Image (tube, rainbow, N blue to C red):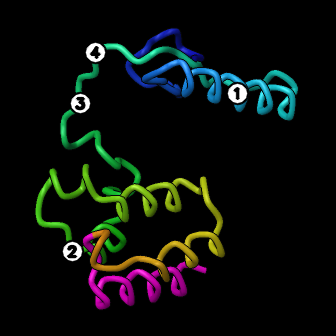
Amino acid sequence: MGSGKRQYMSAIFAHNEEQLAAARESHAQKVSEKKGRVSTVVEKATDFYEAEAYHQKWLLQRKANWFRALELQDARDMIESPAACRLNAYVAQAIDTQTMVGHVQKWGEGEGVSDEVRQNVLRRIKLED
């Protein structure tokens, strides 16, 4: 965890024994691949307190053009949007361009994303690359 604080940490929180076993297996594989250099912890989920809106999707919020491309109405939209979650991962470079384009092409009304928004995001990806 680096600084020793738990305010900002990389963690996997499991809600049942099946999730816990899967998370531990995945974690062990990453530790092996990274030669022990993994700061993520695996823990059973307990009480959860949602962070203030300005902490949510922080990297995405800092990229105003990306954030606007999703046409989110308010903080709740941002927190609950699967599209915002994936786009935040892309902005954080946790997923590559090809993977992100694949996600965007599959977006639809079910994810709260209109055709226009999907096209806006695809245009923005092309501009950034």
Q: CA distance from mark 3 to mark 2?
A: 22 Å
Using the image, tell me which numbered label, if any, was put on residue 47: 4
Residue receiving disc 3:
50
Q: CA distance from mark 1 to mark 3?
A: 24 Å
Sort mark 2 into few (<14), some (14-19) or many (20+) by Cα contacts within 10 Å: some
The span shown in magenta is: 112-129
Image-quadrant location for residue 45: top left
Using the image, tell me which numbered label, if any, was put on residue 71: 2
Would you say the magenta stretch is mainly helix, strand or loop? helix
Q: Residue at x 47, y 21 (%)?
A: 16
- Residue in the foreground of this view, choosing between 48 and 9: 48
Q: Nearer the viewer, mark 2 or mark 1?
A: 1
Q: Residue at x 24, y 31 (%)?
A: 51
Q: Nearer the viewer, mark 4 or mark 3?
A: 4
Sort mark 3 into few (<14), some (14-19) or many (20+) by Cα contacts within 10 Å: few
Q: Earlier in the sequence, mark 1 or mark 3?
A: 1
Using the image, tell me which numbered label, if any, was put on residue 27: 1
Return the x and y of residue 99 as percentages of the image width and height. Answer: 63, 70
Image-quadrant location for residue 36: top right
Q: Is residue 109 above or below residue 77?
A: below
Q: CA distance from mark 1 to mark 4?
A: 22 Å
Image-quadrant location for residue 129: bottom right
Q: CA distance from mark 2 to mark 1?
A: 35 Å
